[in-house]
Image (spheres, grey):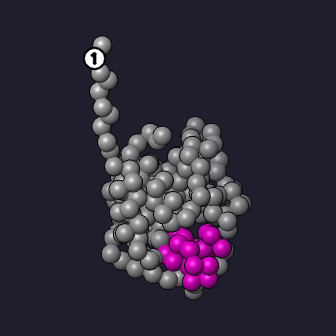
Amino acid sequence: MFRSRTEARWAAFFDELGWPWEYEPHDLVYYVPDFVLKLDASPSGVLCEVKGCNSLEELRAHTAKMGDSGWEGDALIVGSGLLEIGSAQPILGLIGEPTGPLGWLEWGTARLFFCLSCGHHSVLSDEGSWRCRVCGAVDGHVGHAVGAEELWGRASNRVQWRPRKPKAAE
């Protein structure tokens, strides 16, 4: 059970990618994140927030809350779907990476890619780290995201709305 169909669709997409996740697992400072992606190379996981946005500009309005939450690892903000379909590395949304001693998040465009080192999909930052969050491989092990549009389509089909049948009148 999710609070929105969009959250359910992203959970199904994470399943398609083989990314383990937890739904609303933490209470942070004034904030309950939608997901934590339990990717091996990210010890605390990757915080993930789902917003009903359709552009990177709209997603940027939500970075401050995540940056002020006390989270010390990577954070991902996704919208209502993949933002750039048809490219070698489709845009998922924005990814924040901790920088400096206080762990401030530096935000960049989050792209889905296929790691040539471990053979799994992962997420990279156009403006920051190109490391695989599944195996930890760094710069240069980036391949084309394999079948991202098909995986998104399968995830979307898994969460189609079906109306409940009305209870029989007594």
Give, as a single range, the part of the protein colored magenta: 113-135
Predominant secondary structure, magenta span: loop
Query: Of helix, strand and loop, which one carries label 1?
Result: loop
Residue 76, how many percent across, how many down? 52, 58
Residue 130, how many percent across, how many down? 57, 76
Residue type at numbered disc 1:
Ala
Residue 61 horizontal side relative to residue 140, left or right? left
Q: Residue furthest bottom?
A: 140
Q: Is residue 1 visible?
A: yes
Q: Which residue is mark 1?
A: 169
Asked if the stretch drawn in magenta spans residue 119, the answer is yes
Residue 94 horizontal side relative to residue 97, left or right? left
Residue 154 horizontal side relative to residue 103, left or right? left
Rendered residue at 59%/49% (across/down)? 22
Q: Nearer the viewer, residue 42 or 96?
A: 42
Residue 163 horizontal side relative to residue 28, left or right? left
